[in-house]
Image (cartoon, rainbow, N blue to C red):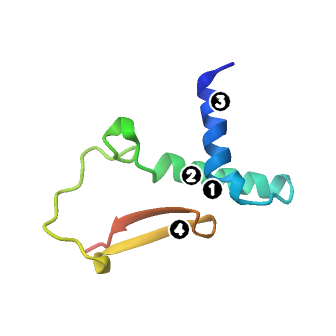
Amino acid sequence: MNPFAERWIQSVTRECLDHFIVFGEAHLRYLIDSYLDWYHHFRPHQGLNNLRIGVEKPPDPVESIGPENVVCHERLGGLLKHYERKAA
């Protein structure tokens, strides 16, 4: 068995599919496509010092950031979230 494939299946199952009742192949594809988009573009990767893929350098440090300066983006009914600073 391939440990990378097993770990991927475990991740997608625990983090996404265990929270839904799947109503067919089209619904399953939608769930997995939404998870894949979040997984590859928005989640922080530990191997990249908790940066997202494609981010070349960490953001500049900020003295203080309050909740009014942060935007939350949700997917799959709030199951998957990512946060970013509001644009100036």
Q: In which quarter of the image is the C terminus?
A: bottom left
Query: What is the residue that sits farthest to the right in this orientation?
Result: 24
For marks 3 and 1 on the same chain, the one whose residue lies earlier in the sequence: 3
Q: Is mark 2 on a helix, strand or loop?
A: helix
Circle 3 sits on which residue? 6
Label 1 environment density (alpha carbons within 10 Å; few <14, some 14–19, many ≥20): some
Looking at the rendered structure, the kind of residue marked 1 is Ser
Marks 4 & 2, CB-CB < 8 Å contact = no
- Residue that mark 2 sits on: 37
Label 1: element kind? helix
- Which residue shows up at 65% across the image and 30% down it? 6
Q: Residues within 10 Å of mark 2 (few under 14, many from 20)?
A: few
Of mark 4 and mark 2, the one earlier in the sequence is 2
Q: Looking at the image, is mark 1 or mark 4 earlier in the sequence?
A: 1
Q: Which amino acid does label 3 sit on?
A: Glu
Q: Distance between the residues labelled 2 and 3?
A: 20 Å
Say the numbered circle drawn on residue 74. 4
Q: Earlier in the sequence, mark 3 or mark 4?
A: 3
- The amino acid type found where label 2 is placed reads Asp
Left or right of 59 on screen, residue 41: right
